[in-house]
Image: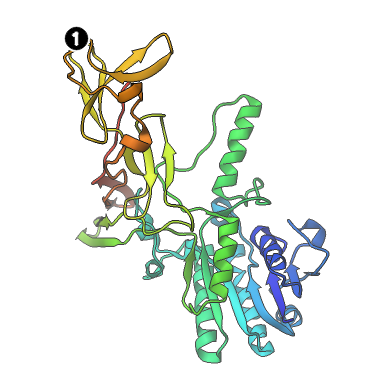
Amino acid sequence: MQRIVVTGAGGFIGGHLVQHLLAEGRTELTAVDIKPPDEWFQRDPRIENVSADLQDLEACRRIVRGASDVYNLAADMGGMGFIEGNKALCMLSVLINTHLLMAAREAGVRRYFYSSSACVYNAAKQAVPGVAGLAERDAYPAMPEDGYGWEKLFSERMCRHFSEDFGLESRVARYHNVYGPHGTYDGGREKAPAAICRKVIQAKLTGDRRIVIWGDGSQTRSFTFITDCLEGTRRLMESDVRTPLNVGSMYNRGLELSLNAAPVQTKDFTWNTGFNLTINNNKVTGLADGLPSIQTATSSLETVNLTKPGYALGYLWVIRTAGVDAGTGKRIFVNSAGQKVYYQYYAPGGQFNYSTTPDGLNKYVSPTGGTTITQAADAVMYKNPLPKYVGGWSNTFNYKGFTLDVLLTYQAGFYVYYGTNSG
């Protein structure tokens, strides 16, 4: 059986990848990490576990000698707080990928996998809340996360050119905020899902009901559970896709328009402005096998969100209403046949039901046998809750070294459904 090398195996994703490969029956494995094995997140005694600094070329040559496949997940990285404060350390990871590529080429490795990141994407395309998800093409023109993002983007190019110039088959995955069991939750290297869980638990235990968040809460992020990340990694490794591919990103197909200008440029005063408009298609194309739809609800009767192919994510699936009855103040609902139904409370049984109006004029339909309106039978796919139009207008004014940034954002083309207190 051909030997597989997994670097960064002492970390979160690398440790899970080793277990995933073992579950597939791939027992000829070498797991490598710079940490001593007793400090690894997961360590399996059935395979070879090696501690090595892969910034060194000779160490890389020893590790990949005789290997058929190499999965490079080794990097000095963490959550946003870590990479913002350790840009040089993050960029030194370029030595790992460069030396592993050189060693893999010399050893005749069959296929090489590199774990990149969503941090390679152009920051200008993420300047406003509600921005459409990022497609692979959005990495260029390049303006990635400073430090870590530049290292990842450069290493992607290294993989590409080793494939083009030397014939080394490489695969590149752009991971999106992977989370799950064994993930770091404190110390500064944790990602947002683990960090918010820790903060809420600490607030509960200490009685301090305040937690610190970054930004104003309007940011949107893409998260990937570890098992989905592993499935995407393995599929990509065995595929014919030779260009970087998102693993864990969902994006809307649509239209994006960006305009940038510098209307005023004088010695003492400058004004730079930019306008962005994104038109989202907002349509789910498919769900996991065996799932016709996914339902989430904020109440037991009205505001249910249904995700199904052909509609926007979380489409409003509601029982329509027709106001209230003037005589009683009771709600009026509309059933699947378009008939108005009176909303009546039967105190003896403590149950809500639907009946005719008290005056007996049969103004509303009375359900046969006293059955109630139900979500399954009477709800309709109502309207789209996600913005179709998203954008912003950014302005930077500079006068003799004093800078003022003004950002206006907008969202339109969606519907917010409010119930009432009548229920």
Task: Give percent across and percent down for residue 220.
Answer: 42, 48
Instruction: Name the image quarter holding the C terminus.
Output: top left
- Evaluate whether residue 280 shows in this view: yes
As drawn, is 246 to the left or to the right of 324?
Answer: right
Query: Taking 59 as reference, is 236 left or right?
Result: left
Picture quarter with the N terminus = bottom right
What residue sits right under mark 1 in the picture? 359
Label 1 neighbourhood size at 10 Å, few (<14), some (14-19), many (20+)? few
User: Residue, x 28% and y 46% (percent of image)?
Assistant: 409
Counting from the top left corner in percent of width and height, residue 162 is at: 55, 85
Q: Nearer the viewer, residue 38 or 54?
A: 38
Residue at 35%, 19% in the rendered image: 353
Task: Name the residue at 63% across, 85% down.
Answer: 110
| Element class at badge 1 | loop
- The number of numbered discs placed on residues in the rendered structure image is 1
Question: Residue farthest to the front?
Answer: 369
Q: Is residue 200 above or below residue 371?
A: below
Q: Can residue 142 be seen in this view?
A: no
Rendered location of residue 391, percent (x, y): 27, 52
Q: In which quarter of the image is residue 40?
A: bottom right
